[in-house]
Amino acid sequence: MIDLVTRSALELRDLVAAGEVSAVDVATAHLERIHATDERVGAFLRTLDDEALAHAADIDRRRAAGEDLGMLAGVPLAVKDLLCTRGVETTAGSRILADYRPPYDATAVIHAREADAVIIGKTNMDEFAMGSSCENSAFFPTRNPWDLGRVPGGSSGGSAAAVAAFQAPLALGTDTGGSIRQPASLCGLVGVKPTYGLVSRYGLIAFASSLDQIGPFARTVVDAAELLTVIARPDPRDSTSIPKPPPNLLAGLDDGADGLRVGVVAEFFGDGLEAGVRTRVTEAVERLAGLGADVVEVSLPHAPYGLPAYYLIAPSECSSNLARYDGVRYGLREEGATSAAMMAATRGAGFGTEVKRRLMIGTYALSAGYYDAYYAQAQRVRTLIARDFDAVFANCDVIVGPTAPTAAFPLGAKTDDPLAMYLNDIYSVPASLAGIPAMNLPVGLDDDGLPVGLQLMAPMLDEPVMLRVARALEAAVGFATTPRGPEALEAPAAA
Amino acid sequence: MTDTPRAAPAEEAWEAVIGLEVHVELATATKMFCGCSTDFGGAPNTRTCPVCLGQPGTLPVTNRGAVESAIRLGLALGCDIAPSSQFHRKNYFYPDMPKNYQISQYDVPICRGGALEVSTDTGTTTVGITRVHMEEDTGKSLHIGATGRLHGAEYSLVDYNRAGIPLLEIVSEPDIRSAEEAAAYVAELRAIVLALGISDAKLEEGSMRCDANVSIRPRGSGAYGTRAEVKNLNSLRSLRRAVAYEIERQVTHLEDGGEVVQETRHWDEDGGRTYTLRTKETTEDYRYFPDPDLVPIEPDPAWIEEIRASLPELPAVTRARLMEVHGLSREQVAVLAGAGLVAVLEEAVEAGAEAGEATNWLTNEVVAWAGERDADPARALAGVHLAELLALVADGTLSKKLAREVLTDVLEGGGTPREVVAERGLEQLSDEAELAAVCDQVIADNAEAAEEVRQGNAKAIGALVGGVMRATQGKANPQLANKLLRERLAAE
Amino acid sequence: MTLSDDDVRHVARLARLDLSDEAVEQLRSQLADILAYAEQVGEVATADVPPMRHPFGLRNVMREDLAGESLPRDEAISAAPEAEDGRFRVPRIVEAEQ
């Protein structure tokens, strides 16, 4: 059998469409890879072998019958366990939802399934998407396939690790302050956080509603663009979904970077940026110039206030969003003599340390007397950050900088220091606050052999230009996505 | 405190200051933020979906019909419609609230600054409307235990059918000065809501709910006293009694040298008193913030004008017109309006009924019937049918007594008056030839009475008319029978 | 920025979270540190700046008042930790605790 797990999503789709391999073979190969490796990686909370094989068999049947197939027909897809899947456990990485089976599917999941992507499992994550290392999962930590002693990043660490480990060519994650881009950076992947409102949030278990977005992980820009195309649709169930047709993400993908103006964010190269990351990112920027892009330095003067603002907005919103986990309608219940006692006991036992910490920050920030100084002020700062981007985009097509200040760090390195952990998001948060699209593109390895990522950002709904520049740079850099190095997960056996 | 709602002391040294918060459940087809039906009376938890159950990952989408209802009421109350308003989350934990926050409005409600004119026996006053805002209702808890009430219950059972039903909260300025004014305000607000058709506004069933903020101050003082919020006012009578009780309680307390505590009090209808529910120290910190799942509501001015143009005549205007055009008394109008029968009257008049006569039938027979059956008379009786009934009386087809029976049948759904009359064979016997034969027979059978009449005792004819009525099972036209009997007895 | 244990317990009550004494102690200093960091937003002059609502500036997203589907009751209550007679069962509700 030809090697299927190292193939791109597009290759797999074309092989299946041409009848050269069956969708069942593709699904089986990936499930086998998961079962052979996930003991060590911990990317999946559960695999959906039966459902996946049944869907794959249906695709094969329809292909044989000459029926139309979806644009991702037969491509295995890993889904972050923050997205609701009807009748299938969806835990948000939390004990409080350990046995929760949603009565409905997330809109993005529906679109992916309608495109005939084969959902092979639900991936591990930091509890309720709060974390940057995947160590805050209530179940087990996920490890970075590039170095199993290191974290994959978070919160979508399971989705990132699954794609990096060749357990799936595509995965869905969610990004609130960097939860797709940072793990993509740490795992050497393409990861896209779309424009806020491009992808429906219906069925995405909310962390911070004004920031949460679903997006793709892939090993190539084109694959990521394909998956994003599938899920980017207006949704009447989400009031914040942009009610107009999405931009065409595939048409101009190969148009190159020549003649485009690329801004380099000065504020993203300050203290705290690891030397190895700085070097690779700077080289990548030089390559962009070599591709004919007009590279200029730009300033986002309010960007340094992004992380402080984020750590008021996101906890405030989550303190309200997570209030529903109270032991009454679904999920965990701990006994209590009164309803109030039962709720407090349930929440005390059901939430992990980081979630409690953020619930406390958010509750405090919204409580009487602090709202204006904290949440409202943070939302005003957010307006200023968005204006900074507007000003820069008046002269630039895309802007770039590092995605994360460091490469993958060892497990346990930052678990005792919440603020140090929060600093992982320092470069990813500004785009989240502004609602603009942003992505990670792997651009090389640091001296430890760990991936380094470049962040690209574009104006609202200008994903096409962002992906186009990424595609051009991807070709120029020639980054090999196979994990390597002494502690790396072994590569799939050659065919 | 007795049942008599008199706040005598307040009329002397003290003045009551009352503001009301009224909640109205909207009669939209679906809930505020999801497509579940708002129909009353479904089995528990059958009108729920992932959204109104607060399932993880679900999102609210605003019901345009509810927004339109809010604008309708705002315009009717003379409010400004906010060019941009938004929904906030009111955060507190309660088992009947699926998300443990209520989507409501906070600093930018959809309507602000209206007024309502309120009349009582002692005069007319204008009560300012602070705001009208939209929010979602909570579910309902059934308390299981010896008492069947919250207090002393062993556990509770929650039904979320009501959770998410759209509510409007109407907040008045503290412009109300007596229990009577408070009741009149709510009655007038209810009339407006009914006229607008945005709610069935039933206090007893909870589709209209009222909380009263009551404080007192020395008469002539401009300052406000400490207020108590009184809850559980399930009828106009409760409202009147509770406010009167609370005024007197506060006056007595202050005159005894005590202080009024800021607190929430519960009206105990059976006990005729209020008691402390919770004091200010335990009042929640609601942590309001704009709901990030919803975007601002900025009604297009053209939409607002469209709604304005569609507003019906408001109850105050209707009342004035009924008095002026139809010559009805204030009391008659009040009864008609209170029973929701104004439209029925107008339809009847339109169909040819005489207004005074129609009003008498409505305010007496129809209102009494509705009271007995606890039914909505406007649904039971069309104005054209009332007009038809009156015409049947006028043309002698029906006696008044029979007309009452026919009316009852009509109200019970038995058909139109003509149909009921035909079905029951109730037409008055007005055929001269037929009736003359009956009269002859009755005279023959009652020779003694007939003789008395012949002798000039006019009163004696009553027995003969009675005989005719008996012989016809009440269907004889009594005037015609009388005339025929006289003709016969005079002729001999 | 300093917080007392009582401040932490008050916030925990608002957030309906049972916390151990150790957790209270740990959170007291962590919350103070994090909030001190976050308070940097106060350095920004924002006098005439409106708070962000929706990044794309969406307005007036509404649905028509048309019925959608409700869940069958069995499904609505299927995930309930405790149910009785088609309703969600909860321990007694003490008004003063709510």
Image (cartoon, coloured by chain):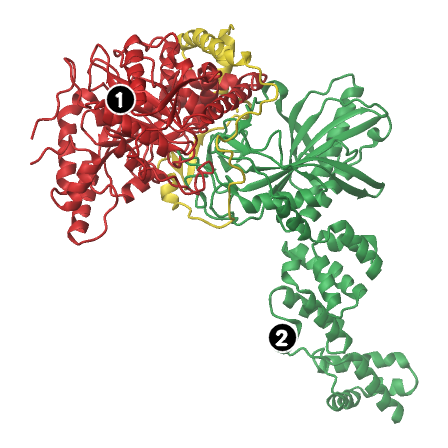
Chain under callout 2: B
Give above or below for B353 relative to C91: below
Element type at mark 2: helix
Amino acid at pointer 1: Pro
Locate residue B475 relative to residue A285 in the image: left or right: right
Chain A tint in image: red
> What residue is shown with label 1?
A442
- Residue A176's quadrant in the figure? top left
Amino acid at pointer 2: Glu
* Residue situated furthest bottom in the rendering: B492
Chain under callout 1: A
For label 1, the crowd category at 10 Å Cα-Cα, with few meaning under 14, some 14 to 19 and many 20 or more, is many
Instruction: Name the one closer to the observer, A224 or B227.
Output: A224
Locate residue B26 relative to residue B78 in the image: left or right: left
> What residue is shown with label 2?
B419
Q: Mark 2 or mark 1, which is nearer to you?
A: 1
Chain C tint in image: yellow
Marks 2 and 1, how far apart at CA = 85 Å
Q: Which chain is green?
A: B
For label 2, the crowd category at 10 Å Cα-Cα, with few meaning under 14, some 14 to 19 and many 20 or more, is few
Instruction: Name the one closer to the observer, B123 or B373.
Output: B123
